[in-house]
Image (cartoon, coloured by chain):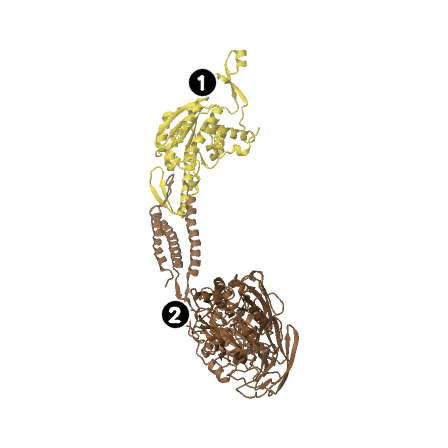
Chain colours: A yellow, B brown
Amino acid sequence: MSATPHTRLLSPEILAGLANLELIARTAVEGFIAGLHRSPQYGFSQEFKEYRAYAEGDDPRFVDWNVYARTERTYVRRFEGETNTRLMILLDASASMGYGSHTVSKLQYGKYLAAALAYLATRQHDPVGLIVFDQKVRQYRPASRRTGSLQAMIHAIDAVSPGGGTDLEASFRSFGEHLKGRGLVAVISDFYCDASSLTNAVRPLAWRGHDIMLLQVLDPQELEPSWRDPVLLEDVESGRQMTVAATYLAAQYRQRLEAHLQQLRQAAADTQAHCLLVRTDQPLDQAMRRYLSFRQGKA
Amino acid sequence: MFVAPAFLFALFAVGVPLWLHRIARANPTRHPFASLMFLEASDAERTAKRSLRYWWLLVVRLLLLLALVLAFAGPQLTQRFAGQPAAAGRLHAILLDTSLSMQYGDRWPRAIAAAQAVLEQAPASDRAMLVAGRGRQIEVLHPPVAVADAGGLRAAMRTLTPGLARLDYGLAMSTAEGWLEAARRPPDPKDTDSRFDALTGIRGGLSTGRPGTGLDQSPVVLHLITDLQRSAAPQRFADLQPPAQARLVLHDVGDGAAGNLFIEQAALDPADGRSLIVTIRAAAQPDDGPPPDGPTPGRQIRQLILNVDGKEHARQEVSLTPAGMDRSSYPIGEGGGMRSELDYPATSLIAPLAPMSAADATAAAGMAQVVFPSLELGAGAHRIELVLQPHDSLPQDDRYRAVIEHADPRALLISRSPDADDAAYFSSALGSLTAPRLTIELQAGSGLTAAALASYSVLVITDAGALSSEDGVQIKEYVEAGGTALVALGGESGVDGAAVGREASSRIAGGLLGEGAGGLLEGIRLLAVHDGPARVGEITIAHPVLRESGEWHRVRFFRRYEVRVADRDRVLIEYGDGSPLLVERTIGSGKMLLLAAPVDRNWNDLAIHPSFVRFIAEAARYLIGPGISASSTTVGSVVLTGLTAGGGGQIFDSQGNRVLDLAQTRAADRLIPQQAGFYEIRGERGVRWVAVNVDARESDLARLSDSFVQRWQAMPLRKATLHAVSADMDKPSNDESRTMSAAIALLWLAAGLLIAELLLANRHLAVRRETPQ
């Protein structure tokens, strides 16, 4: 059974019309995986690789009872590509993430993305955790491999609402208290901060052996402002207002934004992190594809 | 200057867009944005651009309101502001005389050539229009067009032919301002009739509309191409004054002296009503002597043929010498005493001249009278046509038509009894009358009605005492309405002695006395009855009834009434003692003869006397009248059809073609004949013939004198009216009182501003729609 392209590439607007975030995550991920089965570039499968002695915390479903009958030892089956990659999702819930020029705001898109990654990781039997932050850590859920924890996490993601300002450095300093082992850290934010602040925030995590993936979520209106008239703009975080010329938005603003993005990419590269810009009007595939490739490379 | 200045109060509405724009500027729309991290404020640029655009929108809205308000207020621009008309060329109005006289000789080809010359000599930038004048109608045959594009006008000119009507120069000049204005106004697509009624000022069937609207104001040259016929001059010289906005140019296409023989009139001899007197005239140049280059007209001999109902009835030879028309007998003059055609309606033509025998046909200077005696025509209408042969150069006036109505009179004999002696006497006497021959009906007793009596020409009452009072009222109404009556008093046998009382008078005069209510014999008193012989005294022999009344003196009276009449009564015969015997009274439109004696052999021997028959016959003829009339009318005059009073009908022209369409058959109350001949009017009351002749004034081909023409051309122009431009052909108008409405232009401006406002406002709205939420 093959998925149609449009199913795999469900737009954020369509996903927004679904009942709940779990369904959104499942729909996005299943469609994405079905598309992967048709693709020769990705070897995502469940092929058997090796046996490993059972350890506490392993899912009993994967115990090979035939081996146990023969050897009276408990082994669990391990599959191709399966590693114990801990995924920690850091979701920015600042006020700037609440901006959106169309149906889906940046925070909503980030929530879809976080839920989809969590679902995907759970499907890979990876433990998944969640940290919601703005100026500080607002919510923390430790990484867990259990299936039941996924629903709780999705509910937690669903309950996130835009908050105050953003302070990446302070937030990332707090993350060190919660990120014990090495793992994969996916940061979902709009990264309205200086490149140096980002470097300062990410570098401690990198030093601690975390693989960091920065998912920068931006609205199309932020990337390509469409105003053809001078416009009065209000910062959703600070409330500050500013009248901006259309010509500035069409030229200087884009240049400055592009420079900023370039600096962010450079800062990410300096810290061995991977930076990916995603638009809120695009499907979630790109982020998930980047996640899987990144995971495979680390596995 | 505004037509409706009250609308200017709506200018206060300009405050609405001002207020709206102020609100819009004070409340700019804010848009949330994720971060102002990469933004810079640009207040100066924003304010400048946005303000500029809003100012344009505000200006457009204000102008739109201003244009609408001014359009409804109706500003009137004076000539100074309206500017001069774009067309600098002149308008050549070619008025072609299409009257009957233009058919003489080669006048019409010369007129066409003159019109062509006008077009050829006019500059190409000028314009020209073609107008035909005949009768009461000035018909614009072709509207103004550029001279360079006058092909249609030339074609219309070639198809034009002169008619039979008469052109009155005064009428053409006095109405020129109206038809010039009507022709120069932009054409109304609903108006398909280009005729202009010179009397009513109505163009076609529609009103000329509001004067001055879109009027072409280029100067006008009015070319009158005519034969300058003297009889076309108006009664008043002032009527020839050219219109205010035009310069008059006369083109004489006449050919100098032009002799013409024509039938002027045909009428019945009033003496006997049976002889037809025909007046023939020979017209030539009266004042200017013999023409310098034309032959002197000599004595002319023609045959005058009388046709009755399409068949030749008689023929006579006429010989006469052309001479100048006698102004006293035929009032044609250069502004002196000529009557317009409206003074010549369809008239009963009774010749005012003394009767002449055929052998005595007079050949006076320029005039001859021919008598066709004793036309024994039966009852009813007869079409008579007089034809002069051979024809001359103007054959249309060599024919004259008339309709002779020969009545068939009826007499009603009212007596006490059909077998009474007096009834027999009167009936026998009336029956002996041959001209007119009476149809006698006898009625005894009462039951008369005025409506029934109206069909009788005369009532003969042999015994007034036989009538009731109701009969008396009906008879009086009949006489007042134009009827006639011959009344004889009754022979009351019971009356004896000197005095006649009220009761006896009623028995003698019956219901006619009506002293209380005013009867036919009101004011006549029966004083007494005298026994004993009496003779007739004074007789008014001048009265038509008593022209041969010598026998009355031999009538013997054995008894007689003594009667006293009113002062208004005329006593025609008296007894020897002065008592009235025969009295004439006029009542309303009718008249009555009262014989104050009964026709009874016990009272007198009048009935057996020879003078009785003669008296009754003459009295009946006198009361009935001649009973015959001849009538005719002229081309272009108004004839009442009488169709609207009845159930409608149809009119056939002289060619037998229907004149009325279906919608007009019940609404055509008048006819303006355009052809000469007999028109047949078929209505509910039968067939009526109308004889139509050409206007005799058109037959006088004499030309206006040079001095007259010079005085005409030297006349000052009429005073300019409100709508007329100055008559000065060389100077631009300085009359600033003339105005033109700018409302239409303002409405167009408002429409353009509305479109601009929509575009500008939509641009603002489009920006707002694209704003992210």
Q: Can residue B251 be seen at all in this image of the molecule? A: no
* Tag 2: amino acid: Glu
Q: Nearer the viewer, residue B447 or A13?
A: B447
Q: Name the residue beneath numbered marker 2.
A: B736
* Residue A29 placement (x, y as % from top left): 50, 29
Q: Residues within 10 Å of mark 2 (few under 14, many from 20)?
A: few
Question: Would you place residue B393 above or below residue A57 in this image?
Answer: below
Residue drawn 48% across and 36% down? Answer: A282
Give the tally of numbered discs.
Answer: 2
Where is residue A273, by image quadrant? top left
* Tag 1: amino acid: Gly
Name the residue at the right extreme. B311
Q: Secondary structure at mark 2?
A: loop
Image quadrant where one finds the N terminus of chain A:
top right
Q: Is residue A215 left or right of residue B605?
A: left
Residue contact between numbered discs 1 and 2, judged by CB atoms under 8 Å: no
How far apart marks 1 and 2 lie (CA) works out to: 111 Å
Question: Would you place residue B422 above or below residue A243 in this image?
Answer: below
Q: Secondary structure at mark 1?
A: loop
Q: Can residue B578 be seen at all in this image of the molecule? A: yes
Chain where mark 2 sits? B
Q: Is residue B610 left or right of residue B753?
A: right
Q: Nearer the viewer, residue B76 or A202?
A: B76
* Residue A212 placement (x, y as % from top left): 43, 30
Q: Nearer the viewer, residue B712 or B303?
A: B303
Labelled disc at residue B179: none
Question: Would you place residue B171 above or below residue B255 in this image?
Answer: above
Chain where mark 1 sits? A
Same subunit: marks 1 and 2: no
Q: Name the residue beneath numbered marker 1.
A: A57
